[in-house]
Amino acid sequence: MPMFQPSRKDGIVGFEGGGDGRILDLDTAVKDGVLGGVPVGSYAGGVGEKLDLKKMIEELNLPQVPSVFICPISLEPMQDPVTLCTGQTYERSNILKWFSLGHYTCPTTMQELWDDTVTPNNTLYHLTYTWFSQKYVQMKKRSEDAQGRASELLTTLKKVKGQSRIQTLKELRRLVATHSTARKTVVDEGGVSLLSSLLGPFTSYAVGSEVIAILVNLALSSESKTNLMQPAKVSSIVDILNEGSVETKVNCVRLIETLMEEKDFRTEIVSSHSLLVALMRLIVWSYLFILDVLSSVPEGRQALKDCSNTIPTLVKLLMRISESCTDYALSILCSVCKLSPEECSLIAVDAGLAAKLLLVIQSGCSPVLKQRAAELLKLCSLNYSDTIFISKCKLTRTIQ
């Protein structure tokens, strides 16, 4: 059998395989956009000591990596690439394990190997190293920038009020959500105490929701948790929980849960009727969200239709919890009623749906919600004469 011979171009070894097995030289990789033009040899991007490839791969944990760097066996970036006689390249440990299992074929092409020698692919290693080191240095620079910016924002937060304070908090929230160095800076520079001081009886929703969104991303000390357990601060968190968006509600619950983990936590701190109501509303919203997802598939719609409590329960929830809950309830009702209009509309109207839909249409809900209510009302009215349908609405003569 012929032996595989590596080809040479300008002193750089390149390996020719079929299709995706072709390994590019450095110049071609830069030209094709795989690399960003960093000179070969400057792998650390200006960093003094040479970076460890394994460490860079682990810390970056990138969701997308050029396919030329991926081992076809493990589907992970290669740290020690070697090439077979077929021209295909693999991670050394993976291909040696393949051989140890008694396989003497190329895993990608399934060609029988005429030579089991594995040749270190230095060109691909340097390509991989350069690409990852660029990304790593960029990440480190962004982290340093985030650290400095977080410190600046904390200083600004001590000085500003009103809309400027809200904008500062929004930027700080985005920063701590994406950079661990920013989170550490906020904690180390006393940011938790500063943020906690913004929660109180006169805290606006706009400020409070941003503060809570930041706090749930930070590692809170026992002292910080004790400070947040002051009645005035807990009351502020509960108020924001009651009037906030779903994201804010979840953040409030997460923060309360964090406080409850503290050994000095006292249950009476959160033993309030308003907190119970807010949590129950959040639970109802969660259930409706899940049911809405179920109603989007045929099996789910059929199961909801077959349950005798589905329509009456959803009708009761309309205009009782929140606009988002009403939206989900209407969405589910539309899906179920369209499955069997005659049967379901009779049940829905008897449960008081028509009156509820008219209330939705006359309320301050979004135009999309009103349109959905109008469509469902029209669907429900098809099986009735005008007189009977109006009587089913159970409204006063004036509203009729």
Image (cartoon, helix red, strand yellow):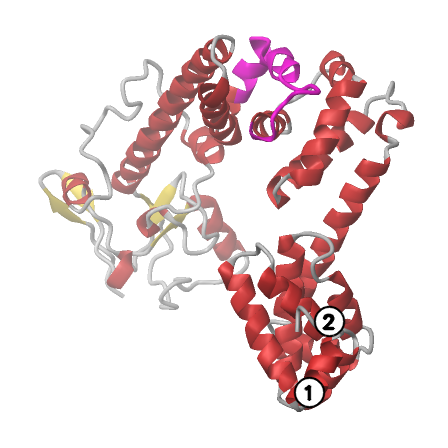
Q: Circle 1 sits on which residue?
A: 387
Task: Say which residue appears at 64% left-offset and 87% top-offset.
Answer: 386
Q: Where does the image place residue 303, in percent across and percent down from the top left?
A: 74, 78
Report the Cα–Cα distance between label 1 and label 2: 13 Å
Left or right of residue 294: residue 178: left
Q: Where does the image place residue 85, in percent across and percent down from the top left?
A: 30, 56
> Quick one: label 2, few (<14), some, or many (20+) residues within 10 Å?
few
Task: Classify 373 as above or below 381.
Answer: above
Q: Which residues are magenta?
A: 183-206
Q: Quadrant of residue 112?
A: bottom left
Task: Say which residue appears at 39% left-offset and 68% top-offset.
Answer: 110
Task: Classify 238 as above or below 334.
Answer: above
Q: Where does the image place residue 249, in percent across and percent down from the top left?
A: 67, 40
The N terminus sits in image quarter? bottom left
Residue type at mark 1?
Answer: Thr
Q: Residue 395, which numbered label?
A: 2
Residue type at mark 2?
Answer: Leu
Left or right of residue 29: residue 159: right
> Quick one: label 1, few (<14), some, or many (20+) residues within 10 Å?
few
Task: Classify 19 as above or below 28.
Answer: below
